Amino acid sequence: MEIQKQDCPSPVEVPAENLSEEVLVALVESFILREGTDYGQVEISLEKKIEAVKRQIQRQEVKIIFDFESESVTLLTKQEWAKKKSV
């Protein structure tokens, strides 16, 4: 049985505390690597980028979102998530 788009629940926020540290780091690392290369004047290590994003998640500035339709997880800013929820 194929699931139709209208049958899929809306995307949901996944509380970071529901994830193990290993899963959280893997998720953040995957997101950072998807976003491409940073061409700034000062190169920032992957580890520092991961820690920075984890702090944003802890401060609830960035949300972990699971999309049932695509069966994927992404990170959105609090503002992006609020906008997506209101559509």
Image: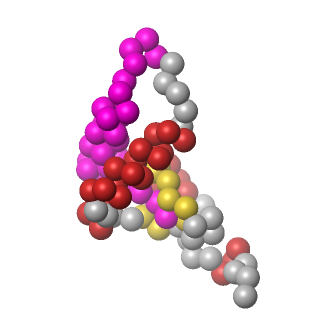
Residue 43 to residue 74: above or below: above
Residue 70 to residue 2: above or below: above
Which one is nearer the viewer's eye here, 29 or 80? 29
Would residue 73 appear left or right of 70 to someone viewing this image? left
Q: Can residue 33 be seen in the rendering of this structure?
A: yes
The residue under the point 35% across, 27% down is 45
Would residue 24 appear left or right of 41 to someone viewing this image? left
The residue under the point 46% across, 40% down is 32
The residue under the point 51% across, 19% down is 39
Residue 48 part of the magenta-drawn span: yes
The residue under the point 57% across, 76% down is 9
Which residue is situated farthest in the bottom direction here? Answer: 1
Quadrant of image for the N terminus:
bottom right
Residue 87 to residue 31: above or below: below
Which stretch did the figure color magenta? 40-66
Residue 29's x, y, as percent?
A: 41, 44
Which residue is situated farthest in the top direction here? Answer: 41
Would residue 48 appear left or right of 30 to someone viewing this image? left
Q: Quadrant of residue 41?
A: top left
Residue 57 part of the magenta-drawn span: yes
Residue 52's x, y, as percent?
A: 31, 37
Would residue 41 appear left or right of 85 to someone viewing this image? left
Which of the colour schemes (rainbow, by chain, secondary structure, one colour) is used? secondary structure
Residue 3's x, y, as percent?
A: 70, 80
Number of numbered callouts drawn: 0
Which one is nearer the viewer's eye here, 63 or 50? 50
